[in-house]
Structures are given as C-alpha cells and as structure tokens.
Image (tube, rainbow, N blue to C red):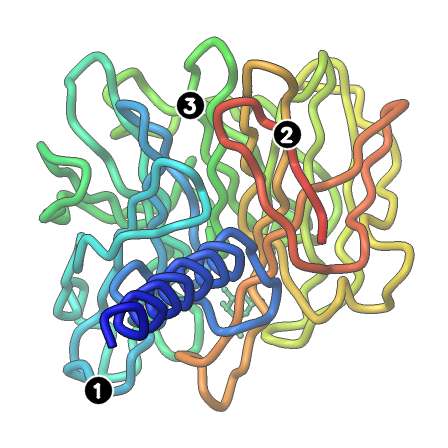
Amino acid sequence: MKSWRWVAALMAAMVMVMSGLAQAQTRIWVKPGAVWRDTQGKVIEAHGGGILHYGGEWYWFGEDRNPKLDRAKRYVNCYSSRDLMHWKGRGHALVLADPEHLGPHWVLERPKVYYSPATRKFVMYMHLDDVHYKYAHVGVAVSDKVTGPYRLVESFRPLGLESRDIGQFVDDDGQAYLIFESRPSGGFFVARLSPDRLKVERPAVAFLHIPLEGGALVHYKGLYYVMGSHLTGWRANPNVYATAKKLDGLWTEFRLIAPGSEDTYGAQSTFLLKVTGTKTTAVIFMADIWRPKALWDSRYLWMPLEIKDGGMVLPKPMAWGIDARTGVVRVK
Ligand code: GAL
C-alpha cells in the first residue's frame, strides 16, 4: 500500500516537472504572426510599437486597439521585459481624449518613448491626426516614470512639415532622432531631438527622397541601416532599406529587406531593435501584420535580421529565441 503511494507521488511529480519543462519550452520562443500573450496570459496590444532600453529592462510601447475601451479615447500600452521573451503588462502609459478636437475618429499612432538624461524625464512622441489624415502632427507627452502616466505637453508639425508615420532612433552616442514621413516633401526625414527631447532640431540630419513610411533605423558595425515601407496604407508591401556610413549620407539605393516575399511576409516595419550582448549583437526587425477590419487582432512579426557585408535580409519568419545577455539568437 505504502509503496503504491510512493509510485503515485513520484509519477505525479514527474508529470509536473515534465509539463513545467514543456511550458518553459513553449514560452521561450517568439512566434511571428501568432497571438502573443503577456506574462498574465493577456493578449499583447502594442501595435506600431517601439522599444526603450532603460535600467536593464526593455519597455515596449504601442497602440492599444482593444475594441472594449472607450471609443472616444486613445490608449498607449506599456510592457516590460528582462529577456525580450516574456513581457509583463504595465498598463496604460497614456490615455488621451481627443486633445486637439480632431473628431470622433481621431488618430493616435506609432507611439515611441525616449529617455532624456538631461531632464531625467521620459518623452513620448506619437502621430496625431483626424480621420482624413490631414492634421499630420506629432504629439509630445512627458512622464517622470517610464511606465507613465504620460501627460501631453504639445502637438506640432516637426520642422513645420506635415508628419504622419513616425519612427525612433537613438545612436550609440546617446543622440536621439525622430524619423517622420512627410508626403508633400516626397520622402522622410531623420532629425535630431534636443537634449530634453522636446524639440525637433533644424536642419534635419537626413532627408531620404523616397516616399516611405514605417521608418526605422539602426547603427550596426559602423553602418547605418534605414528602412521603410511603401505608402499602401494597411496593406503590406515589399519593405526596403538603404545604408550609409554617416547619417547625413551618402545613402545607397534602396534594396528589398525580404527578397523571399512579395509583401515582407505580410508585415510593415515599425522599429529596429539592437541587442548588444556579451558575445554578439543582434538586430531584431519589429513589424506589424495589420488586420484593418480588426486592428486589435493585428499581429507582430519580430524576427532577427541576417546582416553581413553591408546587406540585411529578413529571413522567412519562424520561431526563435534570444539570450538577451549574450545576444545569441537561436532559431527553431
Ligand atoms: C499605414 C500606416 C499606419 C496607418 C495606416 C492607415 O500606412 O503605416 O500607421 O496610418 O496607414 O491607413
């Protein structure tokens, strides 16, 4: 009798250990295009997002498109992670109620957060617009804490220009830049931010004369890689990139980032995340697979890029993982 109990207890323990292992196995992979859940099991809502690395943690900010939220307001979510695999929901970093009276279908897109060492404040940029995308402003919000609450301080057109999709870049020297698409100019700008991150400084450092949005930029092994998508709204298209030794150029011609796919595997660029590890440096392509009829169900395509000889390639999406400490990526 006694020995049966032992066997039963041992078997139960083994089942627990094995299911624990299986869970750990499934949890350590990022699966592009799949529903991505936070550490509490809630679906991650952080579209058009960007990442801030601060105090040893990564903070992911993005649009919360949950249809159950108050339709009159717009919400930016924040998630934090120490390993880039497990993301903890930190709640709404920003909640706004149509600050510029843009009408019921007003738009808040692509939030990006910078840290200002000069003021020790966190500064969020976002695209603010009306239903017809005519307002074309950026909004700037500030918080004392990384997770918020952020308070809108103003909205303006950077350098006096129409600005729609925005992107974020912080160079290795700590200098912060705003990327913004400007339709009447026929291209997109990369402009320095002031030390307090509240102003966009003139003149712009770079103007890329090609109509691209979803702009992203990374500095990797002495070369700048700038990236964007063509102007096809929510519909995915072949995203392209160019390189330069210096931010102000000369830039190469634009080339396809995903030669294996006609539409970047259905995704649109939003951010390039550089992970500098003890062994190697990885660059992760972050993009949105938009579902315009159910924006809340839009998916994320995060995938490590293959970079060599001054060229980058987005490989066919598959499950992957990273050791955020060493920077070593593994693909399933
Ligand atoms: C995309 C843009 C999105 C959103 C959408 C609206 O091109 O990247 O952020 O603005 O158009 O149609």
Kind of residue at disc 2 = Val
Q: Marks 3 and 1, how far apart in space?
A: 35 Å
Kind of residue at disc 1 = Lys
Query: Which residue matches tag 1?
Result: 68
Density class for disc 3 (Cα within 10 Å; few <14, some 14-19, many ≥20) is many
Density class for disc 1 (Cα within 10 Å; few <14, some 14-19, many ≥20) is few
Q: Is mark 2 within 8 Å of ligand 1?
A: no
Q: Nearer the viewer, mark 3 or mark 1?
A: 1
Q: Marks 2 and 3, how far apart in space?
A: 26 Å
Q: Is residue 216 above or below residue 107?
A: above
Q: Sequence order check: which comes first, mark 2 or mark 3?
A: 3
Q: Marks 2 and 1, how far apart in space?
A: 39 Å
Q: Is residue 161 above or below residue 45?
A: above
Return the x and y of residue 257 as percentages of the image width and height.
81, 48
Kind of residue at disc 3 = Ala
Q: Sequence order check: which comes first, mark 2 or mark 1?
A: 1
